[in-house]
Structures are given as C-alpha cells and as structure tokens.
Image (spheres, rainbow, N blue to C red):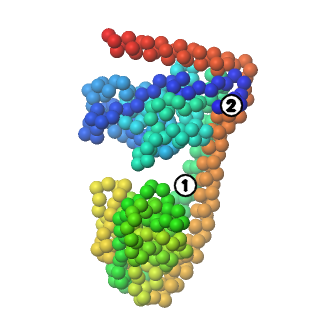
Amino acid sequence: MSDLPPGWVSATVGDIATLTDGPFGSNLKTSHYVEDGPRVIRLQNIGDGVFHDERAHVSTAHFDRLEKHQVRPGDVVVASLGERPRACLVPEWLGPAIVKADCIRVRPAGAVEHSYLMWMLNSPPVRTEAGSRVKGVGRPRLGLTGLRQLQIPVPPLGEQRRIVAAIEEHLSRLDAADASLTTASRRLDALARPIRQRVIESGLELSLGDLLDTIEAGKSFKCDSRPASDDEWGVVKVSAMTWGTFREHENKAMLSNERVDPRWEIRAGDLLVSRANTTDYVGASVLVGAVRPRLLLSDKSMRLHVKATAHKPWVLHALRAPTVRSQMSAVATGTSDSMRNISQAKLRSVRLRVPPLEEQRCIVAEVEQRLSAIDAMRASLERAQRRSKALRAAILERAFHGELVPQDPTDEPAENLLTRIRAELADTDTRRGHRTST
C-alpha cells in the first residue's frame, strides 16, 4: 500500500485487532437453538455496514460454554462465506451474543475506531484484496488467516473519527434517497397490478391447461458454476426467468459430455415458466426473444406450447396477473420458502378468464402500452439506485485514500498508535496465555 497521506501507516487487520471465528461442527447446531436467550449472530445478520435483526437464540448454559465466541457491542463482525466478505458492527441493543461458523469477530485495539475499521473492511480496495484471498469453489470463504493478512490504511485517531463522521453523514443522505426510491418503486408496483389484472377480467372461465397443447420439462445436467462461453452448451438458471425478461446470461456451463437432445434447446418465441423458485417467483414466466444458440432448459424450467386458439403474448400476461400469481404460489409445494416447486398438473389447473382471440390481441396491445410507461419510470429508478450504489463505493474509496476529510498536522502520527496497539495486543496475548496455563 503506497502513497499514504502524511501521518498514516499501513497495517494488517491482525496488527490492530484480535480475531475469533464461530464454533464449528457439533459445538453449535440448529438443534441448539431455543425460543429465547442469548443471540446467535449468523451470516444473515451481517450486511454491508448494517446489522439485520434476524433472530436465533441459544440457552444461557450453552452460551456460557461458548465463551470464546462471545461478542460485545461495538465489535466488528465479518461474514467470511461468499466471494465478497462484508462487515458490520454489533449494535448496542443486541445483548449477550455469540458468532456462528463463517462469522468472524474482529475486536480492534483501543487506538482504532471500531467504525473506521468496519468501513475500511467494506471499502472497494479492501474487498478486492479480500476477494483475492477467498478460497474454495462450492463454498468460497475468507478464513481467519486471510482476514488477518488484509492490509488496512491507518490514519491518526483524530482523523479516523473525522472520517467516520463524514462517511456517516454522506451515507445517511444516501439512505434517505434510497428510501424514497424504494417507496416510488412500490407505488409503481401498485400501479401495475390492476393493469395486469385487466388481462383476465373478461371471458369464459377455463383452466390454463385448456390453452395448452403440451408442457415440456427440462433436464438435469452436470454444470460448472461459471456461465457458458459462446461455443459451449449452457443450462439456464431460475434467475433467467425471474425478472420479467429472459436473461440468457443467467446460465451455467454444462460439464457433461453426453449427447445433447435438440428438444431441450431454447429458441426464440418460447414461453418459459420457472418450475422451482421462491414463494414470490415460483411460476415466473418469460417470452424468449432473440437468444444465443446452445442454451438448454434445466429441470427447474418448463416450456409451454400454446394452442393456436390462444394468443401467446396474452397467455404470458395472464400468467403474470395477480390472481393467477396468487394461485401458483398457493399450490406450490416445498418445505422452504426459498425454493418452492409447482408441478405440471398444478400449473394446468390454474383458473383464469379467457376472452376471444381477437380481444386477447387488443388487450395485449393496451396492457403493453400502459406497462411500457411504468417500465420507463422503473428504469429511471433503477438508474438512480445504481448511481447511489456507485456513490457509496466512491465515498469509501475516497476515505481509504485519505481524500474524504482534510488532514490535521497536529494529530498524533499513526505510527505511534501502532506501537501502542502492538504493546496492547501483546499484553492481551500474555494475559490470555496465563489464564489458559492456570
């Protein structure tokens, strides 16, 4: 780390803090959780600088047995599982708590502002370095050693405090702007619902199966986690069908050398439905436009063949009508809200009103005109959200390089702080070793 401002030093996380990860294996299992008691900090609690109040508890007796893994307010906790480790502070109101496996407690020394260290761990340069130290493919993880070795710029203590104040002031304004964008997005959703429902408000009540010749299911293939290159076969993920338009880049490269049956290849004009997804998105549907070759249906997707007596774009919009979506969510099966399944038979049984063919065409033209205006407003909101995200990263980037607040030449140099920190941590290690030996 070069070109640091005057008075700053470069240090590793291990130079300025003590680290402890959560208990693994049988020391802390889901079966240990109880209705009330000390809290367990899990991956879902740790956001980008934000603690999420997702609750899990253990008994006081079990909490006492895991003393090494306990946290206190102001500790930094890091989610080490995933390609982008993230960090937040333990809030004052949390009470007694321990970290779980894949969560690391980082306790800065006295001469380091806890919030400063937390924001630096979330800054783009440190995250880039952390990403380079992540190991594993199926479950990528930044271990204790990798976290200890991360390089952090350390300014004088007074400047740390000024940087934290500036970051929090800037981010509070962005938080307010993001809240307004979220409210606006919800209003657009509310405007779109009656427009989508308009599709099935008239006509004979039929089942979806009455409009279909057949339903084709995809196949399970052995895949790599990376997307397929242009000359490889790819298998679509459920996310390719989740967001209203077909996303061909949401695929996995096929590993198997088996001969590919061309029946499973996705083509322009296909009406696809997600067989497996979350409760909110199971049964999500898309109409495929131009599509790359060598892309296959997965076992979590279905292709609907619509009869000539129905207008395929109308069927697409009918599948997105609120009452039809509610039916699909209600009949989907599965023990977890994160992955529900809808069978072909249940999909065929969904009830809806079907107008005559020519009226279907007119309804589609009217609905798409109205939704296009909403889509334009939504695209504007999404651009604003991306700008907000980029601004957050830019603020932390400037803080990392000492460009967020002016330097004060009267501040005690950070090199002096580092000397005291090393002595403090050495003393802590000595006292911990003495307690262990006795």
In the image, residue 376 sits, relative to residue 419, either above or below, namely below
The residue indicated by pointer 1 is: 183
Decide which of 215, 176 is in the foreground and name it.
215
Q: Is residue 378 left or right of residue 253?
A: right
Q: Quadrant of residue 365?
A: bottom right
Q: Residue at x 38, y 61 (%)?
A: 222
Q: Is residue 255 left or right of residue 172?
A: left
Decide which of 302, 377 is in the foreground and name it.
302
Q: Position of residue 436 (x, y in %)?
A: 34, 15
Residue 434 seen: yes
The residue indicated by pointer 2 is: 2
The kind of residue on which mark 2 rests is Ser
Instruction: Characterize the local packing of mark 1: few (<14), some (14-19) or many (20 or more) Cα atoms within 10 angstroms.
Output: few
Q: Position of residue 312 (x, y in %)?
A: 46, 81
Q: Locate the C terminus by quadrant.
A: top left
Q: How many marks?
A: 2
Q: Position of residue 89 (x, y in %)?
A: 49, 33
Instruction: Characterize the local packing of mark 2: few (<14), some (14-19) or many (20 or more) Cα atoms within 10 angstroms.
Output: few
The kind of residue on which mark 1 rests is Thr
Q: Position of residue 282 (x, y in %)?
A: 38, 64
Q: Residue at x 64, y 20 (%)?
A: 414
Q: Is residue 90 left or right of residue 165?
A: left
Decide which of 63, 122 is in the foreground and name it.
122
Say which element carries label 2: loop
Q: Residue at x 54, y 23 (%)?
A: 15
Say which element carries label 1: helix
Disc number placed over residue 208 in the picture, else none: none
Q: Earlier in the sequence, mark 2 or mark 1?
A: 2
Q: Residue at x 38, y 27 (%)?
A: 70
